[in-house]
Structure formats: C-alpha cells, structure tokens
Image (cartoon, helix red, strand yellow):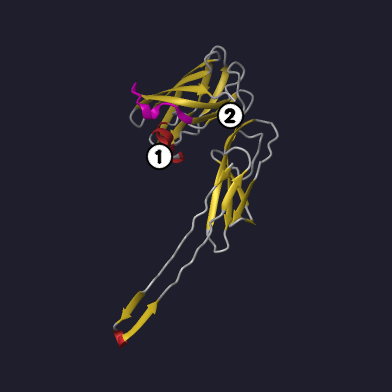
Amino acid sequence: MKIMKKINLVLALLGVAVLFFAGCEQTTTDNISKVTNFPDFEMAGDAVIWHHLGDVFTDPGCTATEAGKDITVTTTISSRYKGNTDFDENDADEYTYTYSAINGDGFPGSVTRTVYVAKVGDLTTSIEGIYTADVKRNGVITAQYMGLEYIYIWKLSANTYGISDAIGGYYAQGRGYGDNYLASDCIITANDIPTNDFSFNTFSVGTFGGVAEMKSMIVDPVAKTIVFTTDWDAGPYTFEVTLTQVQF
C-alpha cells in the first residue's frame, strides 16, 4: 500500500517591504522561496489487519522516501485498552503501529496501521471476540448508536472475562466522546455459558463516574450475538446492548 504524503511547500516573499518609521530606516526582503518534499510512505500489507490470538505476527513494515531517496522510518506501537507499548500476539487488544519519518528540512510525517488481535470464541465455551454494537438507552435507539465499532471481550481467567465497554460504546463511540468515557472495569463471570448463567461486579462509567452494573446476558451461538443490559444510577439509565461477533 503506497501512501502519498508529498507536499510542495512554497514560501515566497516577493517585493515585501517593511517600513520601520522609528529612525526613518527601511528594510526590504525580496525573492525568498523554498521547496520541501514531505516524506512519501509505502506501507507493505494492509492498513487494517485482523489477527487470531496466539498466532505469530510479523509486522509487514513500511518505508519512506524524500524526493525518491530513502529516509529513516521509526516505528512505535501502542494498544488501545491495556496500555501496551509493544505488540503481544497473546494479548487481545487493538494495536496501532505508527510509522514516522522526518525530511531533510525537519518536517515530520507519519502513517498508521491497525492490528486487531482477538480470539473468536464459539459462544458455547468462550464469549471472547470483537463485536459491533447496537445500543438502546432507556428503550430508545437512533442510527448513531447502531453498528458501533468495536467492543472487545477478552478472557481474564478460566471463567472470567473483561469487556472494553460495558455500555456498548454509547458515549465513547456513539456520542464521539472518546475512550475516557468507556465503562471498562466490568468483570463477567461465566458460571455456565450455555444456560446464560453469568454474574457481574459493579463499575463506573469513565469520566462520568457513578455506579453501574450489568444485570443480565444472553448468548446466542447460532446468531453469533450477545445481548446484555446494564443499569447506571446517573440517569438513571438502562442500556440494552446487542453485540454481533466479527468473524475473521
């Protein structure tokens, strides 16, 4: 994948006269121009990669040139939910690879790649996965709260799971408030998945705070969906979230 970020920056000051009346002196700057070539990036592979948890991953890499000449690329990695600064194929998360370069005039450029790492649970023995979400709040849903991308469920121990947002991305994605508004401290205990026997802790809703609790969860392994409800005392509000598992 080639990503063109070449920009000709032309700074031209032609016939500009600046008059300083103090002391009756005149300073003139004429015919100054400069052209700079921003880094051109060529990223191998796809900008978005779906990767199965536990499989070995090799970064396809990225190169950069300035006016056709190779320049140095620096790669940094961050994960969205767990704060990792390196890639771990055994840790489910949304990883961002940022490829950066600086041209000869000191102007920076960068491109990014997203790597989604997760296990696709069978929804009979595991509810792990990446999901889209439709969210009703107090029984109401509009288009902006449908198809929200993405909600993660990852395994914590033999029968416990974490979820990236226990209100389905209503504020973080639906409202566009960002990840400071995730309800991310919910722990789901799967007592028996086939009979929808789950228990839950209490948690808060990001910057808003308050006390929230998941009240029920229904898993449908045929439809590849999970429906759960969360009550939050701030409204009070009840969120009914329908998750649809992404297959990859």
Percent x, y for residue 184?
Answer: 49, 34
Q: Quadrant of the C terminus?
A: top right
Reply yes or no: does residue 143 show up in magenta.
yes
Q: Secondary structure at mark 2?
A: strand
Most foreground residue, 22 or 244: 22
The amino acid at mark 2 is Trp
Asked if one can make out residue 83 in the rendered structure from this viewpoint, the answer is: no
Percent x, y for residue 61?
Answer: 65, 44
The amino acid at mark 1 is Tyr
Q: Quadrant of the N terminus?
A: top right
Q: Which residue is mark 2?
A: 154
Percent x, y for residue 124?
Answer: 59, 15
**Label tally:** 2
Asked if one can make out residue 55 in the rendered structure from this viewpoint, the answer is: yes
User: Is residue 217 shown above or below 173?
Assistant: above
- 53 relative position to 142: left or right: right
- Residue at image coords 55%, 13%: 222
Per the model, the C-alpha gap separating discs 2 and 1 is 23 Å
Range of magenta residues: 138-149
Most foreground residue, 139 or 200: 139
Q: Which residue is mark 1?
A: 177
Residue 53 badge: none
Most foreground residue, 73 or 147: 73
- Residue at image coords 43%, 36%: 172
Nearest to N terminus: mark 2 or mark 1: 2
User: Is residue 193 shown above or below 146?
Assistant: above
Q: Secondary structure at mark 1?
A: loop
Mark 1 surroundings: few (<14), some (14-19) or many (≥20) residues within 10 A = few
Percent x, y for residue 6?
Answer: 52, 53
